[in-house]
Amino acid sequence: MSDIENPGQLKVHAGGIAWRKQGGGKIIDVDKADIARVTWMKVPRAYQLGVRLKDGLFYKFIGFREQDVSNLTNYIQKNIGLTPEEKQLSVTGHNWGEIDINGNMLTFLVGSKQAFEVSLADVAQTQLQGKTDVYMEFHVDDTTGATEKDSLMDLSFHIPTSNTQFVGDENRPPAQVFLDTIVSLADVGSSEEPFLTFEGIAILTPRGRHSVELHLSFMRLQGLANDFKIQYASIVRLFLLPKSNQPHTFVVITLDPPIRKGQTLYPHIVIQFETEYVIEKNLLLSEELLSTRFKDRLEPSYKGLIHEVFIKTLRGISGAKVTRPGSFRSCQDGYAVKSSLKAEDGLLYPLEKGFFFLPKPPTLILHDEIDFVEFERHGAGGSSVSSHYFDLLVKLKNDQEHLFRNIQRNEYHNLFEFIKAKGMKILNLGGSQTTNGVTAALHDDDDDAVDPHLERIKNAAGDESDEEDEDFVAEKDDGGSPTDDSGEEESDATESGEEKKSSIKDSKKEATGVKAPSAKGKSRDGDEEGSKKRKPKRKKDPNAPKRAMSGFMFFSNAERENLKKGNPGMSFTDVGRALGERWKKMTAEEKDPYESMARADTKRYREAMADYKSGGPSTNVDSGASD
């Protein structure tokens, strides 16, 4: 039974009934040949349309007005050939009545009106309590009730010995007769045997090893701690995504509604298969079923790579479409780039219609949901390690943000070209910048070759290495361990970035002064060997005016010590990251005092710079920045 209580659009047409969830996602398409029965029922504040299929599945569509009932009734009669029956709902609250079992649906009637109904396919366990009570426990970790705030956990029926509906005898009371009827229809002890089983499959989300059983009407994941049952109607998409440079392949089953474990919802089931593992499976299905119900969808037997066999059989039984990698290729010719999301390491797959981060937390972002993307320099500015990585911020139209961190720098070009080809807005590039200018800013360390629209990427560059980045080899998957930062102390992210950007802009204007070369970054064997690893710094006139500070720098100087006092032992890198996050969340009113200070300091710098260039006296006012 499926209770469709999410908002959506229902379409009744000559070929059947279709329903699409509002905002995208689940689609229900029922052919009129599969419809067994249609019913109307008056429910609080609306009417409910019930559609029962011949295979026992039952859909409820709620929210119709009174005038819709007659119009739809006439249309259904004319085009589908069925006359909708009218059912009445009992609202007396009485708990004594009769039981009607139709297919796998159990309806409790008070008089001739329906009090409630349940699907026997959702019954996980049932047993006789005493001689007159039958106890039923329902599946709670499947998709049937995942979107509900409350779920039916168990139910108990009292069947007196005088009951005439389930006639028994001295050795077999009516309650036992009723129990046997339930067992024959319910999903107790897998009364419906699976036609295909995959043993010991590694499922990363929700984590654990499970046996995956494919039944005619549902899929079951059986593990030591969890037992999930998934209706095929809940599967909206399948993904087959090989892991870069690793002998494993992801298969993702996207669900709507999701399965639930406790209070956690899982809209994506992430399975990991060994890529080169070959299996041979025979389907335990009759020739009649294969030639009629599953014609051109399933074969009697399969032999091949395990992930291909799994995806083909699941697609055949569920009808869900399969998404594979698209045109994107990484610098190692893989399908994804190594990244981190919410302190978890994983892979970011740029697909034709979206981005998918795996394995944990599995995050699917459709291109249509994206407002803009923004490339950012990874971490804080002073570390040479951070210069080898960048971050990708994805802002959605609903104001939600996803920050994919620690992407290797040599992946930038392919990722940028892919995003640009999809027509997505790249915020920090403006409308006139070309790909070549952006790439030069990431791969050229010359201060004279700077793209001014890459301030977010090029901030805090420090002294970068001229050596090529080493080929990236994805580490063995650890199931989503927390991200391990470089371990080196880095300066506060935006603070150093502002200083670096000012240095880049001003270096062209300032006169070249004479300054002793710094020993920092110099090889022990002399300048010749050191020059291979690091470019010489541009000379700076010690008499030049001190550069202006940004609003964030004033904010950082004011709050850094308070943050350290409240968090003793906090690393320098974490302090910078925390300040950046706080600044990002501040309102314009909260930032205004610091921005005012920045404007005043900018005015001071311009005046001092004008005097400096004209040869006049230099007033080097210390604005609070440290060299």
Image (cartoon, helix red, strand yellow):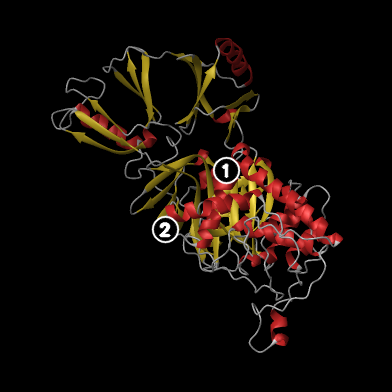
- Tell me the residue at 15%/30% (across/down): 131
Q: Residue at x 48, y 47 (%)?
A: 286
Count of numbered circles on the image: 2
Quadrant housing residue 173? top left
Q: Nearer the viewer, mark 1 or mark 2?
A: 2
| Left or right side of 339 for 141 | left
Q: Nearer the viewer, residue 395 or 9?
A: 395
Residue 568 is situated, as x and y percent measured from the top left of the image, at: 42, 58
Q: Residues within 10 Å of mark 2 (few under 14, many from 20)?
A: few
Q: Position of residue 268 (x, y in %)?
A: 51, 47
Who's the residue at 48% across and 62% down the image? 571
Identify residue for label 2. 568
Residue 603 sits above or below residue 123 on the image: below
Q: Is residue 39 left or right of residue 497?
A: left
Q: Residue furthest left?
A: 170
The tag earlier along the polypeptide, 1 or 2, is 2
| Residue 338 in sight from this viewpoint | yes
The percent position of residue 189, horizontal first and vertical second, equals 32, 45
The numbered mark at residue 58 is none
Q: Quadrant of residue 247?
A: bottom right
Pointer 1: what residue? Answer: 585
On screen, residue 535 above or below 290: below
Q: Say which amino acid is labelled 2.
A: Pro
Q: Secondary structure at mark 2?
A: loop
